Amino acid sequence: MNDTPERPLTRGQTIVLCATAVPMVAFGGLGAVGTYSNITSVFHRSATALGVVAAGEGATLVLALVLVGLTMLGQSAPAAVRIGLWTLPAVASVTGAAVAQSTTEAVVFAVTPMAMCVSAEGMGLLARRIVVYRTGVDAESQRRNAAVMQRLAYHRARAANHPKKKARDGSELESWKLAKKVGAGDALLGANLVDVQRGRMTTGADAALAGMFALPVTPVTPSAHGVTPAPAPLPVEGGDEEGVTPPMTGVTPPVTEEDTQVTPELETVPPKGVTPVTAPPETPVTLEEIAAVASVPTPVVGEPLSDSQLVVVLRHLRYTDDPPLSYRQAVAAFREAGFVGGEQRVRRAWGSLMSHEETGA
């Protein structure tokens, strides 16, 4: 079933096509007149000349009208119609050459009926192209491809299951010959293949550009308990060499019986009626967030990934646990999650990730 919307012919196209069809019909008619004149010059009887013209150019005209009508209906022409378009003018040419009285006349009489043959073929081809342009359906190409595919299916089955080795070998060879004819002359098939390749090239170019212009992602290393450690205290003026803050002035530490200053261990006891506040757990970084920082599309499970997307996925998987996953563990998680990527590309992406971690980029 064809989903292509019909395209109407413009006024200019209609005028040009009509102007093209008129000479075809005119020269076909001139060929019939020439054949009539040639036969009359030999037999001197109009009835005989009319019979020759009717059997040659007349029958060809009938077949041409049948061909045009079937084509305009979106149907393929039978083999008899296509063969007759060339056979009948050829018969008229042979008849003219046979009745000619000299070699020169034989050549002229043989060439004259071919005008109707060419006119009929031209009209059929023009009608076919109009239908293909308006509907997107080429009935002749579909007929040829269907016949080729039918023969190909037969020979593939024969090559696989025939009891005789000679028959299997012959069908195998014939299958390769038929494979060259699949889709031959089908302009619609060629256009569809070009669209498919254009889409693939667009995807590849997008992945290449994303890899070239992507920014490196700074790895976020969580602490052992999933909480970012607090910064070290700043040294205070007057402190000791290790940066320890001296005790505050005016505070007397407790004194024991041995007159030794002892600093008791501080206990954090919340006041009565006050609920202690617990720091909320740190939310892990998601794959979408890492992809956004790296300025690459979010990797999707089951779809081909670019090199930058591979680095993003491996970075995300590596830091899903503590301590961070090793290469083998990350690759196992990568496969288990359903991401797509060849072994060599994954290994290169891991090397890029490790180099960024070592340089702190």
Image: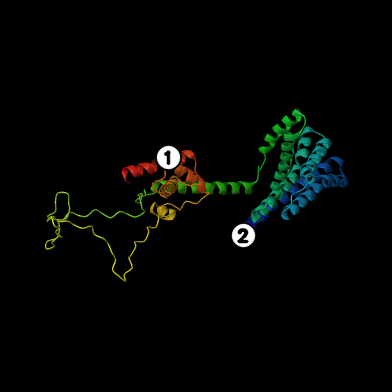
Q: Is residue 339 visible?
A: no
Q: Position of residue 308 (x, y in %)?
A: 42, 47
Question: In the picture, residue 35 is in which quadrant?
Answer: top right
Most extreme residue toward the front is: 257
Pointers 1 and 2 in contact (CB under 8 A)?
A: no
**Residue in the image at 31% along x and 69% along y:** 274
Which label was assigned to residue 135? none
The residue where tag 2 is placed is 10
Residue 125 drawn above or below residue 105? below
- Circle 2 packing at 10 Å, graded few (<14), some (14-19), many (20+), is few
Identify the residue position indicated by label 1 in the image.
348
Closest to the observer, 255 or 65 = 255
N-term-proximal mark, 1 vs 2: 2
The answer to which of 325 and 335 lies nearer the viewer is: 325
| Residue under the image location 17 percent in, 53 percent down | 244
Q: Quadrant of residue 273?
A: bottom left
Q: Position of residue 336 (x, y in %)?
A: 51, 46
Along the line of sight, which residue is nearer the eye, 160 or 110? Answer: 160
- Judging depth in this view, the residue of 284 and 35 nearest the camera is 284
Q: Amino acid at mark 1?
A: Arg
